[in-house]
Amino acid sequence: MDRAIAALLRAFASQLHPKMLALLVVPFVVAILFWIVVGFLVWDPLTSWLAESVYDTEGISGWIWSMAATIGLKSLRDFMTASTALMLVLPLMAATAMLIIAVFAMPMVTRHLGNRHYQDVTRRGSWSVAASIWNALSATLLFIVGYLATLPLWFIPPLGLIVPWLWWGWLTARLMRFDSLVEHADTQERRELIQRHRRSFLLLGLLVSALNYIPPLFLVTPVLSALAFAHYSLALLRVERRSVAT
């Protein structure tokens, strides 16, 4: 716990460096492009499908919307349709930004920190775009499946806050732990550290994911996550190597 909090605090300090501030542009660019695609290709078909398949059915659902209309809440169905569409689309946008940070920005983060704070941690691995993309895609696929499967739990207080937070913490840990170690640790070191400290990585993922609930910190969460995991992993690797040497 102490190491995870220390890594997060160091990440806040590292975020202020001009190079790391420049990386914040990436999530914004991804968000803009994502919403352009959503606006032109996805939004209308998605909301139409939800309105017809979920919120325009017979039985209990139809009775609910009829009762809502009689008491002056005719627009409730449109509101619920749009809200559900947002719940489906927003995670994809955020996951895309996180994926790009993990795959393409993490090398810049680890090299930046390695040259400034962890010069004694020798690079024994090598950056592999293919391995990083495979890790990111497999993690994102599992996240999407799990996220959609547990979506009904969002309507049960307080699970609407807890369930997505758990999923985001898991996705962050799964993405960042690999990429934060791949360049400095050899294959055996990386596998052993991930296996031995799996819970600690998840804890750190949950800590940084909690920032998504604090405006405007959610704007810096992707890059801050990369910095926190790089600090945590490189410090962990340093301690591990020193213990082996002694």
Image (cartoon, rainbow, N blue to C red):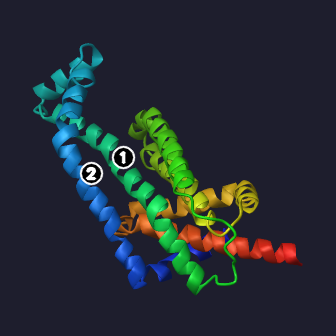
**Around disc 1, counting alpha carbons within 10 Å, would you say few (fewer than 14), some (14 to 19), or many (20 or more)?**
some
Q: Which residue is mark 2?
A: 34
**Residue in the image at 19% along x and 24% along y:** 65
Is residue 42 depicted above or below 115 in this figure? above
Q: Nearer the viewer, residue 6 or 25?
A: 25
The C terminus appears in which quarter of the rendering?
bottom right
Is residue 245 depicted above or below 195 in this figure? below
**Residue in the image at 42% along x and 77% along y:** 20
The percent coordinates of residue 163 (x first, y second) are 48, 45
The percent coordinates of residue 1 (x first, y second) are 66, 67
Q: Nearer the viewer, residue 201 or 123?
A: 123
Q: Is residue 79 visible?
A: no
**Residue in the image at 37% along x and 48% along y:** 91
Q: Are marks 2 and 1 in contact (CB under 8 Å)?
A: yes
- Of labels 2 and 1, the one closer to you: 2
Q: CA distance from mark 2 to mark 1?
A: 9 Å
